[in-house]
Amino acid sequence: MKKTTDFPLLTPISLNEMESYFDRLWPICRSISGNGLRQSFEILQELIPLELKEYPTGMEVFDWEIPKEWNIREAYIITPDGEKICDFQLNNLHIVNYSIPFEGELTWDELKEHIYTLPQQPDAIPYITSYYKETWGFCMDFNTHERISKNGTFKIKIDSDLKPGSITVGSVVLKGNTDEEILLSTYLCHPSMANNELSGPLCMAYLYQQIKAIPNRRYTYRFVVAPETIGVIAYLFDHGKQMKAKTKGGFVMTCCGDEAPFVFKQSKNPKGWLEKITTHVLKHHQAPHSIIPFAVGGSDERQYCSPGFNLPVGSITRSMYHRYAQYHTSLDNKDFISFSAMSNSVGLYYNIIQTMEDNVTPICLVPFGEPRMGKRNLLPSSIEPNDKRRKDIDRMFHLICWSDGEHDLIDIAEKREETPMDYRSILERLIEEKIIAPHG
């Protein structure tokens, strides 16, 4: 049985380089807007040439409005005993993301309404946001919550800005021989979390490099990196009409950083082209996986699959959002992920892309009786039963026989429990000899 690490790549991925980029991105306090987001984009642009666009505060994008921009420099609590806790400089999850500025002294009864913990995970700092309600708050591990004295005055400082600005969205289009597009989308908006934040953008950046290296690409590839929800809604406001006309399939890349089995979340069409391709690749690489139907709980697939667009977009994850205990906590850290697993996730996506590229619907141009192969030097003058060429000769005749314009290469390959990659060189030779023409 093949291992899940057997996904071939066009060019090797340096795990040390991937880890180095992770380490640079990790400490940055990202949000749906602000300087931390832009700094993160600047680092990613070293791997993938994203073009950035700023959407200004107050701009209406469909049913939404671009919010104010948030930046933060410092935040902490001083306990009655003089201890500094919830220090933003030590862990940026300590502050409720998008907290408004505040400085003052409060009793515990006044402060506790602004404190968030996870009693069921006493060592974890929760991740909390308040993008669209102007308030403030702190997140702490439950152990700290329990041990600090509640008697006396707490000094609070939040040095932040919430004012008109913009949100940043990055994208790049990699042209192919046709205008049909494959969409690859991920989000960039969470602070220091590994699987649920950095695995998606990093895997996309390295996948971009693999796809760029494909010679004579058939499809055009659209890469989108945006703050979750509002960023993609803004991008669709600009490009949605074009994408609806051209998108053949796509994925939202998220939670692909750990060693768990793959989870393929389908688009709204469980019998669609995307589902056929992805299921085929997962099956033939014998990668441990599960397949689940589309559901709105999740990430930006719900924007791409909203009724006005209905794009055929799914997602492939490892430990899936909401399904692992570390999700949206400080425990979703570097210890939880594996860079070899992230490379393997890139490999799976690349093999799906390569299968998309290979999966034509061949039509035989010599359909009446089998073509005379000898005069084209496609058959040896004689062949023994155990000749190692026998398998490719059988594949050649199998491919010709089923090239009726009604079966694509996956259909044809599946009849022999094989993959389109097994037929790539044979198909190229038959096209060259004008025995087969590719369609679709």
Image: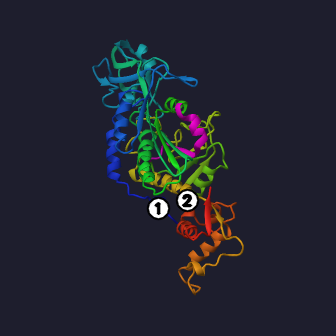
Dot 1 crowding, Cα within 10 Å, few <14, some 14–19, many 20+ = few
Q: Which residues are magenta?
A: 238-257
Q: Which mark is residue 334?
A: none
Answer left or right for 430 relative to 334: right
The residue positioned 44% from the left and 45% from the top of the image is 204
Q: Nearer the viewer, residue 238 or 168?
A: 238
Is disc 2 placed on a helix, strand or loop? helix
Q: Nearer the viewer, residue 77 or 18?
A: 18
Q: Position of residue 109 (x, y in %)?
A: 43, 14
Q: Position of residue 110 (x, y in %)?
A: 42, 13
Which residue is labeled 2 in the image? 358
Q: Quadrant of the C terminus?
A: bottom right
Q: Is residue 24 above or below residue 273?
A: above
User: Residue at point 45% right, 52% down?
Assistant: 211
Question: Mark 1, mark 2: which one is toward the viewer?
Answer: 2
Image quarter of residue 241: top right
Indicate the position of residue 128 as horizontal and vertical percent values.
Answer: 46, 28
- For badge 2, the amino acid type reads Asp
The disc, 1 or 2, on the residue closer to the chain's N-terminal end is 1
- Let me know if residue 223 is in the magenta part: no
Q: Which mark is residue 6?
A: 1
Residue type at mark 1 is Asp
Name the image quarter holding residue 236: top right
Q: Between residues 404 and 305, which one lies in front from this camera angle?
A: 404
